């Protein structure tokens, strides 16, 4: 819900300040609407239902994968597409991947969102409403800002949303923020008191190759980005996750693994190898054998590496795919 509109509406009625906290507490626990908020006066529930939409987002499409993953395509009040995903794991994790922008102004060549037209930054309420949608389906306990857009280009709204996540069951230490290396945002995240996890989308240790697949590298070269990440680590004392999508014949050779290991301080970084979830981009994912060989090379050179579990392949779960298949607003 639009939390600013909620507070304005309550103030106009002369309601006590705790009313906004009551409403938010119900929403964060998974309430489906104002009618469930039994400690609010009946007439107030009715007026809120008329004046403050329960969500800033409208569900346009939802798909559930065979592995339990749920992906939703929303639209904002001004018709912008927004995607979010709920991933369920056997160990009890219920992780939400949320968007921070509609579309993306950056043009990473392997990403479906990067091929879309950029809309705008999302508000903190629009980010939270992605979480609340899934909270109404299931208890959630992990979150990553890794959906549409570059979160650290919208860092104020991201941090404002993150502040409220514990109310929905997601602690700050179980919240991650993924960036392509937007240095001003990395610096802002380091200054924030919230103990959020930083994740860096790296994908190539070679500057020329990284610029080819991630043009933002021309603006913020990898060396400068790694320096910012290391300053973040020095401030927060939390390891930085390096996300490395595995592209067959592009970035998955042995010598590229060695170069990556030589570039990353194992005290600061842990690598997460990501099997490529195919989009319309001209790439193929690395084979399982190639991914394991790459991981082995990293570990031989002292760098911890894991392989991400692939989720939702049968429902176009790669970021931007549902929106790319939807009619333009």
Image (cartoon, helix red, strand yellow):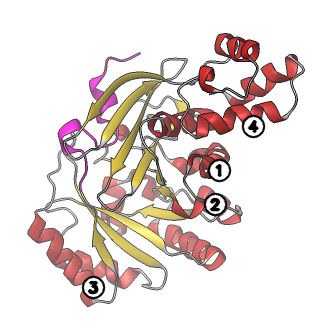
Q: Is residue 256 above or below residue 19?
A: below
Nearest-to-viewer mark from 2 and 4: 4
Disc 3 designates what residue? Answer: 299
Residue 325 forms part of the magenta stretch? yes
Residue located 51% across and 67% down the image: 225
Label 4 secondary element: helix
Disc 1 designates what residue? Answer: 159
Residue 167's tag is: none
Q: Which residue is at the front of the view, 293 or 63?
A: 63
Label 1 secondary element: helix
Label 2 secondary element: helix
Where residue 41 sits: x, y (%)? 76, 19
Q: Are marks 2 and 1 in contact (CB under 8 Å)?
A: yes
Quarter of the figure with the N terminus: top right
Q: For the residue carrying disc 3, how many other residues have a C-alpha within 10 Å: few (<14), some (14-19), or many (20+)? A: some
Residue 145, can we see it? yes
Where residue 75 sits: x, y (%)? 46, 23
Label 3 secondary element: helix
Q: Along the polypeptide, which appears first: circle 2 or circle 3?
A: 2
Q: Which residue is at the front of the view, 232 or 304?
A: 304
Where residue 20 sits: x, y (%)? 76, 32
Q: How far apart are marks 1 and 3 (CA)?
A: 34 Å
Furthest-front residue in this view: 38
- Tell me which segment is drawn in magenta: 310-329
Residue 21's tag is: 4
Q: For the residue carrying disc 4, how many other residues have a C-alpha within 10 Å: few (<14), some (14-19), or many (20+)? A: few
Residue 189's tag is: 2
């Amino acid at each position: 819900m639009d939390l600013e509109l909620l507070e304005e509406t309550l103030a106009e009625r002369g309601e006590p300040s705790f009313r906004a906290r009551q409403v938010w507490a119900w929403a964060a626990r998974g309430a489906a609407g104002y009618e469930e908020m039994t400690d609010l006066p009946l007439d107030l529930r009715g007026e809120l239902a008329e004046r403050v939409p329960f969500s800033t987002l409208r569900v346009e499409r939802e798909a559930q994968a065979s592995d339990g993953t749920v992906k939703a395509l929303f639209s904002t009040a001004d018709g912008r597409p927004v995607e979010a995903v709920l991933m369920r794991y056997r160990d009890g994790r219920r992780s939400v991947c949320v968007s921070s922008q509609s579309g993306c102004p950056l043009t990473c060549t392997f990403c479906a969102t990067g091929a879309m037209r950029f809309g705008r930054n999302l508000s903190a309420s629009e980010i939270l409403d992605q979480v609340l949608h899934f909270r109404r389906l299931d208890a959630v306990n992990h979150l990553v800002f890794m959906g549409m857009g570059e979160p650290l280009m919208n860092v104020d709204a991201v941090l404002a949303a993150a502040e409220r996540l514990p109310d929905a069951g997601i602690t700050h230490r179980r919240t991650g923020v993924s960036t392509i290396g937007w240095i001003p945002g990395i610096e802002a995240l380091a200054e924030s008191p919230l103990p959020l996890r930083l994740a860096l989308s790296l994908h190539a240790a070679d500057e020329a190759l990284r610029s080819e697949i991630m043009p933002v590298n021309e603006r913020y070269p990898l060396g400068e980005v790694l320096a910012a990440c290391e300053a973040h680590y020095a401030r927060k004392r939390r390891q930085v996750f390096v996300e490395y999508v595995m592209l067959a014949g592009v970035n998955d050779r042995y010598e590229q693994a060695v170069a990556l290991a030589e570039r990353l301080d194992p005290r600061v970084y842990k690598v997460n190898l990501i099997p490529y979830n195919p989009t319309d981009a001209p790439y193929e994912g690395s084979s399982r054998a190639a991914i394991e060989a790459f991981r082995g090379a990293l570990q031989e050179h002292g760098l911890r590496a894991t392989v991400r579990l692939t989720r939702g392949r049968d429902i176009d779960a790669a970021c931007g795919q549902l929106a790319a298949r939807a009619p333009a607003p």
